[in-house]
Image (cartoon, rainbow, N blue to C red):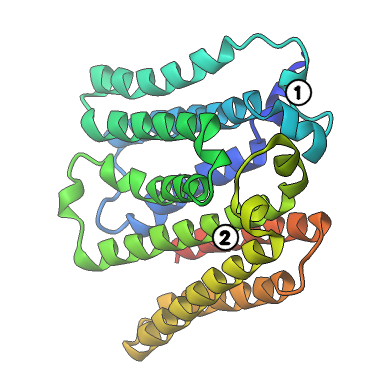
Amino acid sequence: MKTANYIQAVRPVNLLMGMLILFAVRFGILRTDFPMTASESLPFFLYVFSVLLIMAWGYLINDYYDVETDKINRPGTNIFEGPVSPLILWILPLSGLAIPVLGTVLFQTPLFFPVLLNTTAIVLLGLYALRLKSTVFWGNLTISVLGALLVAAPWLCLPDFENISASTLERLMLYALFSFGVTMVRELVKDAEDAPGDTAAGLHTVATRMGISTSRRISIGLMAIAITGLLLIGANSLFHSEVRYGAAFLFLALCGIFILFKLWPAASVVQFRAISLWLKLWMLCGMITMCL
């Protein structure tokens, strides 16, 4: 199997998004309370690398158990349709756990939370691939929780994370909630997009058990809640003269409204695939506003 196929299999765009989220939180939200020091920089970049390895493993282990559904949903894209050694499925998660330990040995960095977060991610991604992705709602919830944890990780891995100010913690939690919500909507949209293959494989998802229209309606409801929350937060920030934050959240609300109008009439696989891309761009907009 060519190296290019492996690179494609680990979803490089999604890995880039994950890396940008970690950078945006560390150098955006946390920059005032926790300025980056020279002694912290290399351990942080090592931890980011460990997270990317685990994310890559998550995509590969999911593909490993998704060969049959991908023959229908994405024919010819799953590398495990060919003669591929599953050895990489062991190397990546073990490396993702070893790197924080290495950082502790070399730089005396905190060990508990980096290892705990990476172990949690590995367990949840493994359970998702083995079982949870074929259950109604629980698979969606699992990936959404991981999306929120990705936002919180740069803070929890700091040696003095408890010294965060109330305002910074509030902003961090709001973005973690935003990540959770956008990920949940995107998972439901992907359920609708993958419904033909999931149905053929006998997987039980929101779209296969309740119908594509129900999956779409739930997504619309969650979008409406998220947009309302963003509007309220933005208006409240402007009321308290926090112009940058207010403008940022109102901008995200407008982006959400645009996507909502795209989602409202969606019915085909092509439409849901396009909406999934718009949701990624919405998350990218959220990352940009973290740096304000």
Q: Would you say 1 lies left or right of 124 here?
A: right
In this rendering, position of residue 165 left or right of residue 70: left
Q: Secondary structure at mark 1?
A: helix
Compared with 215, 255 (above or below) is below
Instruction: Measure the alpha-carbon separation of dots 2 and 1.
Output: 28 Å
Q: Quadrant of the N terminus?
A: top right
Q: Dot 2 corresponds to which residue?
A: 185
Q: Amino acid at mark 2?
A: Val
Residue 71 rendering spot, x and y as whole percentages:
80, 31
Marker disc for residue 5: 1
- Judging depth in this view, the residue of 231 and 264 nearest the camera is 264
Q: Residue at x 45, y 57 (%)?
A: 180
Q: Could you tell me residue 16's position as x and y percent? A: 59, 41
Tag 2 and tag 1, C-beta contact below 8 Å: no
Q: Is residue 131 above or below residue 1?
A: below
Give coordinates of residue 156: x percent, y percent: 27, 44
